[in-house]
Image: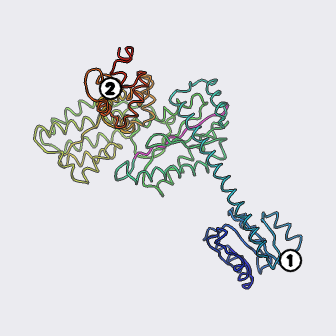
């Protein structure tokens, strides 16, 4: 943008150069500082060619405003006054050049070329800095992931060695406070659709901005880490545990407030206790365990401040036995009223955990299924109604959505299928074994047992010594070995039968598992492997 109070000067400078040959796409003009500011606020200006002496405000005042507003704009001054005080202030403000009028075209081209090259160099440096920050962020994320999965022992010496080797900006003497943000309600639509990918991106951006605002004063280090498909983890580190807890609570409260304004999702924010680094994974696991038990749809949860569990006096199984009998008598309104009241009574009852809630869902589905089978009632067809299907889909999100499903399903004689309870590790093994021939994602496996993928991996590895992915690969390779030994099925078909459409990937995993390729194994090239 050319800024000069004299229209003739603007016209002369505008005609001096072929701007496009310099890579300049557009040239703006302004005849006052006020007009220049308006253009700058509305357009991506990169370079100013600016007069100094102008009415009301000078070109020096304009550059001072640009710096104050933190605009990334380079400035070259053009003036008729060769005064040292002007040049001195221009240099202090960061101008790139100081040209005397009338401006020489060759000199102007050289200064503009230098300014453009300097901007390109700064962009390259910023890009390199961002790449370095991204790389450091990935390393840091991997460190916390390994610490949580217990790939790094929760022992101070081992952790200190990892921090030193990876050059992480962490301190063994700090406390670390975690905040787990779990998206509980996605709103309407497919949870894996484009709308929810945008929602996840928006949630992460909001969280990063708010954490930067709230954690800066109380913590020495902070970050946001992705945590499974529907959660993110904020971590703050510093010396003052009470200050960390306050800033993390303020962050969670700010996030929930912003979410109501800008996002369509609803999140539960779990604020943990400040812990030494070797106990941070233990505290994160507590937050995940609380999430698996918590039945509210949204809000702020501080597990350390939750009340003691209150055990109910009534057994869920006996409740459903009686409700089944009442339902067989055709008293739908009574069953509906009693179940809805029972669910209301469980609000705030810590005994009624998410696992008991899932047992309740399963029992309710079984009751409707038995009723439908005995009365030859086509319940499945009712789910073709979009409103009924939507109510069914969201019934597992909390007590209020389950109450809505009970009222809707009993009112229209519907049933809820597919809810499960029981041991998640055993259920995961069974699910993997039943789907060896399919391309099943890890998120699908975690969804089957209603657990966060990171938490499922942690408890699965603790019990089996292997990750969910590792167990799935082992089971597939064992099945492939059996097929190679006991059938004449082509090797490509064997790969397909154990979930591999890519033969190269199958061959690599088989050789890693047994030390020989599938062809060599079938030909008996390694007796040890066949044994």
Where does the image place residue 423, in percent across and percent down from the top left? Answer: 34, 27
**Residue 526, relative to residue 284: is it above or below?**
above
Residue 300 in view in this figure: yes
Name the mark nearer the viewer: 2 or 1.
2
- Residue 180 magenta: yes
Residue 314 in view in this figure: no
Q: Secondary structure at mark 1?
A: loop
Where does the image place residue 172, in percent across and percent down from the top left? Answer: 66, 30
**Residue 365, relative to residue 514: is it above or below?**
below
Seen from this angle, which residue lies furthest bottom?
8
Residue 103 appears left or right of 355 = right
Seen from this angle, which residue lies furthest left?
375
Q: Quadrant of residue 415?
A: top left
> Which quadrant is home to the N terminus?
bottom right
Q: Main secondary structure of the magenta part?
A: strand
Residue position marked by numbered label 2 in the rendering:
480
Q: Nearer the viewer, residue 119 or 434?
A: 119
- The numbered dot on residue 138 is none
Where does the image place residue 144, in percent across and percent down from the top left? Answer: 56, 34
Label 2 CA crowd tier, 10 Å (few <14, some 14–19, many 20+): many
> Which quadrant is home to the C terminus?
top left
Residue 211 appears left or right of 15 = left
Residue 125 appears left or right of 105 = left
Color encoding of the figure: rainbow
Q: Earlier in the sequence, mark 2 or mark 1?
A: 1
Residue position marked by numbered label 1 in the rendering:
81
Q: Nearer the viewer, residue 126 or 350?
A: 126
Where does the image place residue 60, in percent across and percent down from the top left? Answer: 78, 71
Residue extent of the magenta highlight: 173-184
């Amino acid at each position: 943008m050319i800024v000069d109070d004299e229209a003739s000067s603007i016209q002369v400078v505008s005609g001096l150069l072929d701007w496009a040959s310099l890579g300049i796409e557009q040239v703006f003009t302004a005849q006052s500082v006020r007009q220049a500011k308006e253009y700058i606020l509305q357009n991506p200006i990169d370079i100013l060619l600016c007069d100094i002496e102008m009415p009301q405000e000078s070109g020096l005042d304009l550059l001072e405003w640009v710096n104050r507003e933190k605009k990334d704009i380079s400035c070259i001054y053009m003036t008729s006054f060769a005064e040292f005080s002007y040049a001195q202030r221009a240099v202090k403000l960061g101008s790139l050049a100081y040209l005397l009028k009338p401006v020489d075209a060759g000199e102007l081209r050289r200064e503009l070329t230098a300014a453009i090259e300097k901007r390109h160099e700064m962009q390259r440096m910023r890009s390199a800095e961002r790449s370095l920050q991204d790389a450091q962020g990935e390393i840091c994320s991997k460190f916390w992931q390994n610490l949580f999965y217990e790939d790094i022992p929760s022992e101070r010496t081992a952790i200190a060695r990892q921090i030193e080797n990876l050059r992480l900006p962490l301190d063994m003497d700090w406390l670390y406070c975690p905040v787990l943000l779990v998206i509980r309600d996605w709103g309407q639509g497919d949870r894996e659709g484009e709308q929810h990918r945008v929602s996840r991106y928006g949630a992460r951006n909001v969280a990063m901005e708010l954490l930067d605002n709230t954690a800066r004063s109380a913590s020495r280090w902070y970050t946001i880490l992705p945590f499974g498909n529907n959660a993110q983890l904020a971590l703050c580190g510093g010396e003052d545990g009470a200050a960390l807890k306050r800033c993390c609570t303020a962050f969670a409260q700010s996030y929930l407030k912003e979410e109501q304004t800008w996002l369509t999702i609803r999140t539960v924010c779990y604020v943990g206790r400040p812990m030494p680094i070797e106990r941070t994974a233990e505290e994160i696991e507590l937050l995940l365990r609380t999430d698996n038990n918590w039945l509210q749809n949204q809000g702020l949860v501080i597990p350390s401040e939750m009340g003691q569990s209150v055990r109910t006096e009534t057994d869920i199984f006996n409740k459903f036995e009686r409700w089944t009998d009442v339902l067989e008598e055709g008293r739908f309104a009574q069953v509906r009223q009693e179940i809805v009241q029972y669910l209301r009574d469980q609000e705030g009852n810590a005994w009624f955990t998410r696992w008991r809630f899932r047992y309740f869902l399963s029992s309710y589905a079984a009751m409707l299924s038995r009723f439908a089978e005995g009365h030859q009632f086509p319940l499945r067809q009712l789910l073709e109604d979009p409103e009924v299907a939507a109510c069914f889909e969201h019934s597992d999100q909390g007590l209020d959505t389950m109450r809505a499903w009970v009222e809707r399903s009993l009112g229209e004689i519907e049933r809820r299928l597919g809810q499960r309870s029981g041991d998640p590790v055993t259920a995961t093994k069974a699910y993997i074994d039943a789907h060896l021939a399919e391309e099943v994602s890890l998120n699908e496996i975690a969804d089957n047992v209603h657990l966060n993928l990171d938490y499922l991996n942690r408890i699965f590895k603790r019990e089996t010594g292997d990750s969910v992915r590792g167990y799935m690969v082992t089971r597939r390779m064992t099945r492939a070995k059996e097929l190679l030994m006991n059938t004449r099925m082509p090797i490509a078909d064997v790969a397909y039968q154990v979930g591999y459409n890519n033969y190269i990937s199958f061959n690599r995993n088989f050789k890693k598992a047994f030390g020989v390729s599938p062809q060599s194994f079938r030909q008996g090239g390694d007796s040890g492997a066949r044994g």
